[in-house]
Amino acid sequence: METNKLISININYFNPKQHPRIEATLILAMESVSSYTRSSFEMIIADASTNESAKIKDLCLKNNWIYLHMPGVSFQEGNNKAFSKVTGEYLVLMASDVFVCEGWDTVLLSELKRTGAWMVAPYLTASDYPSQRQLWVFKMKTFIPSAMTLNIIMMKTEHFRRIGMLDQRLGHFNDIDLLFRVRESGGEGIITYCGQVSHISGATCSVSTNFKYYKDKDIFLEKHPCLKTKVVGIDYNHYDKRFMRSRILRIYCLACHWIPFAKMRSFMLLLGARIEPLLNKI
């Protein structure tokens, strides 16, 4: 296989029950990368499933991509081990249920260079972080977010190595832990629009997962005690200025927590998420 590609794309795959839908989803995700990526790239599949997938292995062999079968490793371990095979100047971490679109890579690369950010993620059709959802926000501006997901991110390989890769103790919270460490190291993360990047939220987790939310939360807060909070209804201090850059938005969200009616409180917080890209545009 040729070396020194511009982009190394690591896709994590977990299908211990050999569910055909999960396998088909990954194959479609791989085909979308192959069809729509304009930069030179290599693809590395980190398969944590019990058994090898003959279809995926054959597809990798056919295209000179790398297939790593590592039974039982976690999401973060799989990505970190796959990192040892990376040759590209830029690294993409991507879930197996994300489908990219035409020119996605050139937009992400362009915005990294324009803004000087270390890490960039696209708007997605579905995201646990509301401000990252396509069409939900008022304007899909490039902005400095309060959080981001690891469904798909791009960053310089040297930056990923510098900050120490993914914390292997965490399943949940690895996304915001990574963003926190990027900022603590002097970098920044951004979100930008690069066309319709589709995400089938929970496609893998709905079938099988080894994440343990509350255990991960305790580890995360032990690691970052400055993010502990007494605000009812949130697990960590979302509104710390190291996450939420806009002072206006911090005050607004904290005020929302005084609303006694849960549905109204949720509505007002989601409204704040809709305007975040405008407040933090870059």
Image: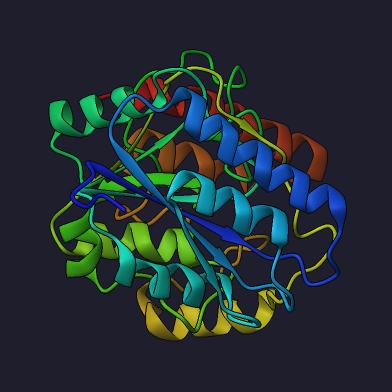
Splitting the image into 4 quarters, where does residue 262 fall? top right
Q: What residue appears at the point 21 percent right and 68 percent down from the top-left corner?
A: 161
Does residue 278 appear to the left or right of 268 in the view shown? left
Q: Residue furthest top?
A: 139
Does residue 110 appear to the left or right of 50 in the view shown? left
Between 55 and 201, the one lying in front of the other is 55
Picture coordinates of residue 142, whole percent (x, y): 33, 24
Picture coordinates of residue 260, whole percent (x, y): 76, 46
Q: What residue appears at the point 71 percent right and 77 percent down from the top-left corner?
A: 210
Picture coordinates of residue 29, whole percent (x, y): 61, 39
Splitting the image into 4 quarters, where does residue 74 fall? bottom right
Between 40 and 248, the one lying in front of the other is 40
Splitting the image into 4 quarters, where does residue 265 fall? top right
Which quarter shows the C terminus? top left
Between 227 and 61, the one lying in front of the other is 61
Examine the rendered structure and indicate whether residue 257 appears above or below residue 183.
above
Examine the rendering and report whether any part of residue 164 can be seen. yes
Q: What residue appears at the point 46 percent right and 17 percent down from the top-left corner?
A: 102
- The way the protein has been coloured in the rendering is rainbow
Q: What residue appears at the point 41 percent right and 77 percent down from the top-left corner?
A: 167
Examine the rendered structure and indicate whether residue 109 appears above or below residue 147.
above
Examine the rendered structure and indicate whether residue 47 appears above or below residue 153.
below
Picture coordinates of residue 234, whole percent (x, y): 62, 61
